[in-house]
Amino acid sequence: MFTDIVGYTALMGEDEQKAFQILNKNRELQKPIIEKYGGRWIKEIGDGVMASFNTVSDAVYAAKEIQEQCKQTSEFSLRIGIHLGEIVFEGDDVFGDAVNVASRIQSIAPVGGIYVSEIVHNDVFNKADIQTQFVKVEKLKNVREPLRIYEIKLDKTYSGEQPKRLKRVTTSRAKKHSRSLFILVASAIIVGGTVYFLMKGKTLFAGSGIESIAVLPFVNESTVADMEYLSDGMTETLINSLSKLQDVSVKARSSVFHYRGKDFHPTKIGKELAVQAILNGRVAQRGDNISLHLELVDVRTGDLIWGEQYNRKTADLVSLQSEIATDVSHKLKARLSGEEQKTVTKNYTQNAQAYQLYLRGRFHWNKRTEKDLLKAIDYFKRAIDMDSSYALAFTGLADAYSLLPNYSKFPSSEMMPLAQKFAMKALSLDNNLAEAHAALGAILATYNYDFARAESEYKKAITLNPNYATTHQWYGELLSYIGRHEEAILEFQRALELDPFSVIINRVYGEILSRARKYDESIAQLKKTIELDVHFPHVYRSLFSTYQMTGNYAEGVEALVRYFELLGLNKEAALANKSFAKGGWQKFLQAMTDERVNLPPNIKAGILAELGEKDKAFAELEKAYQNREFYVVLIKADPRIDRLRDDPRWQELMRKVGFPE
């Protein structure tokens, strides 16, 4: 039996002493009633009590008497839900779909009321002293089929005397399992209350543990939308912590955030992400109080494996993040190594204000606009002002400055040295920070053109955190730059295993395939990316380039027009359409060399080369090199530049950039 004390979480935040008094009174009220009706007191969990009964009527009579006595006390209120189903006892815990159903029914019950499923109603509706009433058909979370819900009416006169019960049946002991556990299986009644404390400490994957998990975006239940940075940030921090576990695959942020605001059954999510379990969470901050509810769900059945509720002060936010990382880790793996325990629970700051500023910075960094990147830089700097040894905040600055040239007119020559400075600072504070090694690797590859050192940094980052999808992506890009295409493809396949719904990784993988001259596979991959996000502009530019190599000019122009339109470049879109319609491919290429058309230098050089304008093509590439632009690293493997490779100026450019022979 679970009984949820209505408003207990809020009370805990306002008056902790009173909350504990209510908890004791609730225990004193329920325990004798449960025993009176032959119920089994399984455990007390948080503000709820979990019990089972031998008959449906026992459960209903107990629930009615509990609610009647609760109303008489007038000090607190309860919600109760009842469902009939098969459950499994293991030690002091219980497993089974019936537990989840009962808890979901409880969550929609009215204050002071009792809701039951149809199977319970069918068993008791003809009893003289039990009156039921149909309420609605409800689709419950993690329950496959909608259920008919009934209410047990409490206005019927009730004597309080224990009704005559069926003779108790003793079940035989089950066969001993290989792990020496005796499991009792029985048809039982669960009186459901709060789900978040259910089956604490157990897992349905006993033995091997859970080998793959997706931490879904925590739901922001705060009263202000501005607190979304907290729910997103806590999600991302937990993902990063769990990714350091050996032999556990943790899906990356961009893939799990694909499900934000969507209500999918766990089985569907598990199939799409290829994971065994998902973790749901709800976060609420009210004043100085933070409430966090977590649920670990078996995707095969939708059953709840484990749940917990955490109530803390905002000043304890940093320690809370370590606590939940530890708790979830122990549910995924029966035993953590000493190194795993250390890395999973590591805090990069003890300052809660600095941590919240860092989360705000990452929230804006993930939006990938000039305005948001500048906001992210401001928040990271403010976090550093609060804690000058905050390595993650310095890594955030490195990431923001390195991205800024791609989303603004800030030149690489100004932004990238700052990015490198902050990446080096982060590593001076913590040389075991995988994100900082990856950030430095990207800077060395795309700005310094130091490919050997970049590869070393990427390998170091992967050793420190093999589940960081971005490192596999960036390392795969580096391998593609220098012509090691098959290795690059393997890295991208690993990145997509970790982050299958990332539009960035999917799009760049399409480009990697094109540079490897696998054009059909490239087109298929880029079309797959469009299915993930039809409004993602850069995938259409990538598709244009691949169509250009295959001679599918009409499709290529159509893709480039769509790219311009999504960026709001309507004049360029009209120019592309008009030139191709009037003069075909050659006229279109000439139009795209117009200075007013903003295309990356490698694409423009490829167009000029196809038009036979080699001098202009080399001038475009030389200008990009002098400005230390990112696109320079693409030219060695870019098939659009093939027409320039027999020119002596090509070898000189390769030497200056530092590409390996």
Image (cartoon, rainbow, N blue to C red):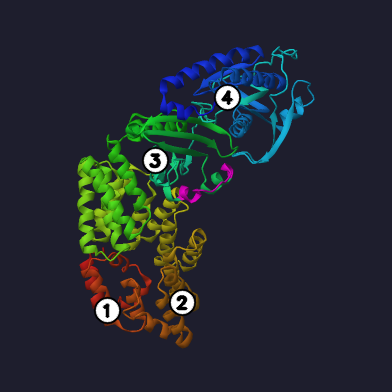
Residue hosting label 1: 647
- Mark 1 vs 3, N-terminal side: 3
Q: Are marks 2 and 1 in contact (CB under 8 Å)?
A: no
- Label 1 or label 4, whichever lies nearer to me, is 4
Boundaries of the magenta span: 255-267
Q: Which residue is mark 3?
A: 234
* Residue 478 visible in the displayed image: no
Give the Cα distance between marks 1 and 4: 80 Å
Mark found first going from the N terminus, 1 or 4:
4
Circle 1 packing at 10 Å, graded few (<14), some (14-19), many (20+), is: few
Q: Which structural element holds mark 2?
A: helix
Q: Is residue 268 visible?
A: yes
Label 4 environment density (alpha carbons within 10 Å; few <14, some 14–19, many ≥20): many
Give the quarter of the image for residue 374: bottom left
Residue at image mark 2? 557
* Image marks 3 and 4: residues in contact by CB distance under 8 Å: no
The answer to if 6 sits in the magenta stretch is no
Looking at the picture, tell me which residue is in the foreground, 173 or 223.
Answer: 223
